[in-house]
Image (cartoon, rainbow, N blue to C red):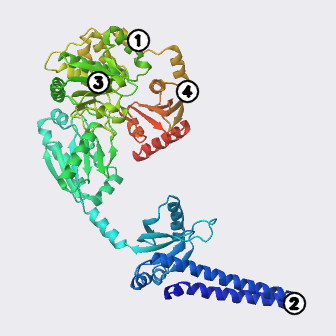
């Protein structure tokens, strides 16, 4: 056996001799007390010695085999290099039993309880062997140091086929603490690019007197420069309402922990009419060059604005993190964008072979009404046009029936028809949603590159990225309001059919709860435009009526509601119902009519999913709560769908997210 193997077992042999001496002393004491034990003691001691020698030689042979396998076809110089490795080195079995430790290892971890770390590694090693992974490569924190642990397995030869295959592994512990610290310093020194935009600059400037404008602008810029100084950043004014911030990445975590206090500080600036000044902040550290980071920040700014502003969006590691967004969206008085979008959409329609309009899953009146408005616009330019409607709820069943009776049966097509008819030159217009996973037929998004998105919901991460035209205004009451403006400002006069105007009007009514929530000047202007078409209000109201059975169910849901956090109502509709999402939405609306209830959430079963409808009077941002559960919407109206949850688990998760919201916002 090589010197290496002798050194390996030297300590084991020494300890074995000590154990044999102790056993011999015990047997002598036993024999003194009882002479009859002399012969059995001698026999027992002889057996112990034989067994010990056998175990020692077996371990010695195993280690020799391991060393030979480990160093197969390697010369003696390489073997000596292994023995005298400058890195801490151990040879161990997969059960955590250490066979040999190098002197470097003993010296490195002399004052560390290393056995606990080795036990943890042994557990991981067992799992990797079960997965047939015979390499170990990981980082481990040991006593305020970071080690790169590299291991290589060797399968030992079996003498008995019935026995389990044994493995041995060599582990190298390479101290990379300095390397990691240096890398952290490098990463912390990287540049982050931020874009800051005043959400309501035009409205603020228009509403304050000329003599006060310089003071307000100076106050805004002072706040921004003070905030930039806290991160040793440089802030540059790009446009009247836009600033660019450059700072080191090490300050980004501090900004996130502080929840971007500048958002609240900006609202402290007083204006003549008391209108709060809000910011949209977009920050990115993604990209090799500063220009790439700036482009990434611009994309993040689109997200921030699409969510209604008054918030910060941080883009890092391929994900968006959101902060703020606690105030209502500010309505933009100017309709220039609506006019530009209308003309751009006309051009796209004229250059396409056909037009397909698609809403969201389980389409509601806003989705169907918006589709009908775009349908009439496309037909005005004499284009072959279809509305894709594969699923819809009870709320639009009567409307769909009426449409088919009035000659729209060939216009409304299902999934299979749409997939067969679409072509690369088809213009696909998505209304009332911007989420890829929530459209009626996601497959259509892959069939054409000519996609237009018209939506009013706060923007989420799952947005349709490849749209060539987007009209996304979170301040709008409904998609029907946006479509009405597009129709109104078309270069060619568009004449809506009465049923189309009624559907658009109904869409606005539904999303505003009869013009109660989320209404602005432009909402009433759109409604007034539609009223010119002789809308039958009685017919529209009948579309919103619930049958007696549904109303009874809603009453039971309201009666069984539970109050949490003093003013939030949570209830469960645990029946299997294809219209569960509609029932939950109506029940959530009904709960808000109760005094002292500021927000409501109703959970229901929708097939294999759990659907949640959230409503608020405006004091609590239900969108921020349900967004943490994969949903979205607005401050006062939001929803979510969960998979893989039981009803109780979904309720528990909802309560956790509500408590998180209260903690984060110090409510």
Residue ID for mark 2: 35
Image location of residue 50, percent across then percent down = 70, 84
Q: Callout 4: few (<14), some (14-19), or many (20+) C-alpha neighbours within 10 Å? A: few
- The mark lying in front, picked from 3 and 4, is 3
Mark 3 vs 4, N-terminal side: 3
In the figure, 271 relative to 374: above or below?
below
Cα gap from disc 2 to disc 1, whole angstroms: 108 Å
Residue 491 visible here:
yes
Name the residue located 47 percent from the left edge and 31 percent from the top edge: 597
Residue ID for mark 3: 421
Image location of residue 467, percent across then percent down = 24, 35
| Contact? badges 3 and 4 (CB < 8 Å) | no
| Contact? badges 2 and 1 (CB < 8 Å) | no
Cα gap from disc 3 to disc 1, whole angstroms: 35 Å
| Secondary element at tag 1 | helix
Point out which mark residue 542 bears.
Answer: 1
Cα gap from disc 4 to disc 2, whole angstroms: 84 Å
Residue ID for mark 4: 575
Instruction: Name the outermost residue toward the left.
Output: 210
| Secondary element at tag 2 | helix
Q: Callout 3: few (<14), some (14-19), or many (20+) C-alpha neighbours within 10 Å? A: few
- The mark lying in front, picked from 2 and 1, is 2
Image location of residue 222, percent across then percent down = 19, 50
In depth, the one of 248 and 449 nearer the eye is 449
Q: Is 45 left, or right, of 645 in this rendering?
A: right
- The mark lying in front, picked from 3 and 2, is 3
Mark 4 vs 1, N-terminal side: 1
Mark 3 vs 2, N-terminal side: 2
Mark 2 vs 1, N-terminal side: 2
Image location of residue 343, percent across then percent down = 15, 25
| Contact? badges 4 and 1 (CB < 8 Å) | no
Quarter location, residue 364:
top left
């Amino acid at each position: 056996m090589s010197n290496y193997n002798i050194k390996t077992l030297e300590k084991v042999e020494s300890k074995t001799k000590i154990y044999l001496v102790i056993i011999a002393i015990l047997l002598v004491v036993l024999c003194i007390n009882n002479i009859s034990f002399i012969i059995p003691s001698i026999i027992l001691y002889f057996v112990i010695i034989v067994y010990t020698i056998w175990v020692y030689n077996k371990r010695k042979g195993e280690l020799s085999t391991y060393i030979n396998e480990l160093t197969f076809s390697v010369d003696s110089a390489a073997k000596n290099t292994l023995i005298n490795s400058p890195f801490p080195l151990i040879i161990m079995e997969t059960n955590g039993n250490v066979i040999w430790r190098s002197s470097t290892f003993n010296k490195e971890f002399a004052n560390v309880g290393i056995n606990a770390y080795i036990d943890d590694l042994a557990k991981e090693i067992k799992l990797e062997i079960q997965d047939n992974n015979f390499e170990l490569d990981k980082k481990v924190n040991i006593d305020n140091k970071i080690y790169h642990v590299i291991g290589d397995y060797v399968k030992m030869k079996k003498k008995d086929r019935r026995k389990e295959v044994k493995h041995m592994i060599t582990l190298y512990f390479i101290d990379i603490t300095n390397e990691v610290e240096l890398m952290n310093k490098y990463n912390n020194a990287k540049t982050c690019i931020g874009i800051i935009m005043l959400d309501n600059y035009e409205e603020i400037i228009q509403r304050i007197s000329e003599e006060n404008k310089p003071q307000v602008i100076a106050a805004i810029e002072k706040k921004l420069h003070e905030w930039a100084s806290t991160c040793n950043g440089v802030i540059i004014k790009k446009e009247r309402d836009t600033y660019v911030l450059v700072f080191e990445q090490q300050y980004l975590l501090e900004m996130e922990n502080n929840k971007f206090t500048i958002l609240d500080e900006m609202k402290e600036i007083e204006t003549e009419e008391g209108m709060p000044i809000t910011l949209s902040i977009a920050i990115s550290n993604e990209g090799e060059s500063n220009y790439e980071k700036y482009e990434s920040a611009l994309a993040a700014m689109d997200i921030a604005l699409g969510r209604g502003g008054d918030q910060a969006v941080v883009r890092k590691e391929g994900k968006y993190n959101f902060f703020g967004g606690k105030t209502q969206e500010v309505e933009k008085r100017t309709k220039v964008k609506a006019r530009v979008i209308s003309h751009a959409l006309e051009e796209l329609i004229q250059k396409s072979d056909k037009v397909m309009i698609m809403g969201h899953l389980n389409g509601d009146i806003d989705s169907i009404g918006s589709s009908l408005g775009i349908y009439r616009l496309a037909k005005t330019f004499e284009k072959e046009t279809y509305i894709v409607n594969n699923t819809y709820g009870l709320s639009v069943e009567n409307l769909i029936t009426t449409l088919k009776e009035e000659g729209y049966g060939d216009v409304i097509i299902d999934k299979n028809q749409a997939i067969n008819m679409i072509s690369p030159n088809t213009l696909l217009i998505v209304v009332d949603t911007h989420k890829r996973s929530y459209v009626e037929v996601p497959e259509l998004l892959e069939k054409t590159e000519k996609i237009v998105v018209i939506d009013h919901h706060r923007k989420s991460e799952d947005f349709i990225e490849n749209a060539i035209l987007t009209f996304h205004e979170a301040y709008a009451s409904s998609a029907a309001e946006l479509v009405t403006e597009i129709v109104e400002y078309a270069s060619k006069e568009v004449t809506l059919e009465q049923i189309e105007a009624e559907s658009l009007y109904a869409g606005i009514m539904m999303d505003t709860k009869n013009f109660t929530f989320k209404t602005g000047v432009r909402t009433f202007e759109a409604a007034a435009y539609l009223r010119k078409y002789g809308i039958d209000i009685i017919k529209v109201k009948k579309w919103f009526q619930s049958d007696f059975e549904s109303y009874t169910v809603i009453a039971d849901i309201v009666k069984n509601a539970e109050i949490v956090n003093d003013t939030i109502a949570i209830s469960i509709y645990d029946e299997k119902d294809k219209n569960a999402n509609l029932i939950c939405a109506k029940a959530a609306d009904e709960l808000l009519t109760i005094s002292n209830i500021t927000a409501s959430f109703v959970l229901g079963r929708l097939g294999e999913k759990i659907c949640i409808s959230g409503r608020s009077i405006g004091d609590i941002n239900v969108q921020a709560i349900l967004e943490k559960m994969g949903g979205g919407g607005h401050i006062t109206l939001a929803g979510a769908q969960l998979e893989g949850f039981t009803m109780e688990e979904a309720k528990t998760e909802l309560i956790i997210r509500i408590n998180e919201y209260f903690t984060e916002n110090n409510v």
